[in-house]
Image (spheres, grey):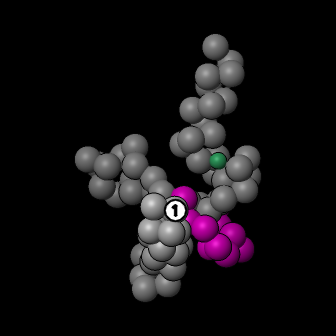
Amino acid sequence: MSIKYKQLEGIKANAWKHDARRTDESVKFCPTCKKCYETFEHQPWNSKKFMFLSNFPSYKKSRIICPQCTRSINDNNK
Ligand SMILES: [Zn+2]
């Protein structure tokens, strides 16, 4: 089970390499959890969807807090 999960993660982690231009435009870097993530804002039906990208270079990416951290910040302020 754990081996299968790791293989899936490996595929996801390297998926950006196959479509670098598209991800370059939609990838942001979250300064709170220090992860790069891809959003799907250009797809209205997917406006809340995002995906963390492991091992993605954060150089020159927009520093925007990711939806997950935004949610937890809002929860803390309640
Ligand atoms: Zn975050």
User: In this view, which residue lies farthest toward the front?
Assistant: 1
User: In this view, which residue lies farthest toward the bottom?
Assistant: 18
Residue 50 at x, y percent in the picture:
45, 53
In this view, 9 is above or below 63: below
User: Looking at the image, which residue is at 62% across and 73% down?
Assistant: 56
Residue 40 at x, y percent in the picture:
39, 57
Read off the residue under disc 1.
Answer: 2
In this view, 40 is above or below 3: above
Please state which of residues 15 and 6 is positioned toward the viewer in this rendering: 6
User: Looking at the image, which residue is at 60% across and 68% down?
Assistant: 54
Note whether residue 42 is visible: yes
Residue 75 at x, y percent in the picture:
61, 22
Q: In the rendered structure, which segment of residues is drawn in magenta?
A: 52-63
Q: Classify 10 Å Cα crowding around label 1: few (below 14), some (14-19), many (20 and above).
A: few
User: Looking at the image, which residue is at 60% across and 36% down?
Assistant: 70
Residue 55 at x, y percent in the picture:
64, 73
In this view, 69 is above or below 18: above
Please state which of residues 20 and 4 is positioned toward the viewer in this rendering: 4
